[in-house]
Each structure stands twice: as structure tokens, then as C-alpha cells.
Image (tube, grey):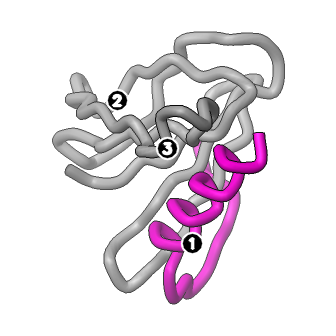
Amino acid sequence: SDTAAFHTYGMMTEKLADIESISEFEGRPQNTAAYLAKTPAGPVVIAWSTTSEQTVSFPTQWPAARVTQIVTDRTKPIPVSTIEKAAGGKISLKLSGRPVFLERE
């Protein structure tokens, strides 16, 4: 909906404020699109599945990541975030065709 898109756009511009660079995320899991954005507030990874919903593992040096979903329901305009802990240098999460934002936690 228009309202959900508006709130997602606001979240995206906040997370990527003053972006310095963006590149493909090296080591991204198969059947995903993933980009690493460098910002003054720290790196942000934007990722989504290029096929169907799937659980994937991203390599990381972070102890945990804040994973923020885009807004898809206009009645709930606040983005939902969860904290995913790393194990063995990887963070596992479920991806769909909708982008998520990962930030160091």
C-alpha cells in the first residue's frame, strides 16, 4: 500500500543516511541478493531472496545483528526488528523476496 511504502522509504533513508559507498556483499548465500552499504553510523547489509522464502547463513564478524523488516502492513507502520546472534561466524535468518536490513548489534 502507499502508506507501507511511505514508511519503508522513511526507514530506508534513515538507515542509509549519508551513504559513503555500496557494493555487493561478498560471500552472500546462493539465491540471494545482498549489498553492503557503508555509512557514518556503521555498515548496513540489505538482503533478500531471489527465489522463494529460505533460511540462509551470512558470514559475519559481528556478535549479533539487528534485522529490520520492511513495512508491509499499512496498519502497522513501525518496522519490526529482531536481534539474531551469530554462531560460528555466521548469522542465520529467513529471507523472502522482501528486503531486510542488517546492522551490527
Q: Quick check: 22 above or below 48?
A: below
Which amino acid type is marked by label 3?
Answer: Pro
Which amino acid type is marked by label 2?
Answer: Lys
Q: Residue at x 24, y 33 (%)?
A: 83
Q: Which mark is residue 13?
A: 1
Q: Which mark is residue 89?
A: none
- Of callouts 1 and 2, the N-terminal one: 1
Q: Position of residue 10 (x, y in %)?
A: 56, 65
In the shown orientation, is residue 73 left or right of residue 102? right
Q: Nearer the viewer, residue 51 or 60?
A: 51
Q: Secondary structure at mark 3?
A: loop
- Extreme residue toward the front, this view: 75
In the shown orientation, is residue 75 left or right of residue 59? right
- Of callouts 2 and 3, the N-terminal one: 3
Query: In the rendered image, which residue does mark 3 sit on?
Result: 77
- Asked whether residue 28 is in view, the answer is no
Q: Position of residue 50 (x, y in %)?
A: 81, 27
Local crowd size for mark 1, using a 10 Å CA cut-off: few (<14), some (14–19), many (≥20): few
Marks 1 and 2: which is nearer the front? 1
Q: Secondary structure at mark 2?
A: strand
Q: Position of residue 39 (x, y in %)?
A: 45, 79
Q: CA distance from mark 1 to mark 2?
A: 27 Å
Q: Secondary structure at mark 1?
A: helix
Local crowd size for mark 2, using a 10 Å CA cut-off: few (<14), some (14–19), many (≥20): some
Q: Position of residue 46 (x, y in %)?
A: 58, 50
Q: Which mark is residue 90?
A: 2
- Of callouts 3 and 1, the N-terminal one: 1
Q: Quadrant of the N terminus?
A: top right
Q: Quick check: 34 above or below 19?
A: above
Q: Which residues are magenta?
A: 1-28
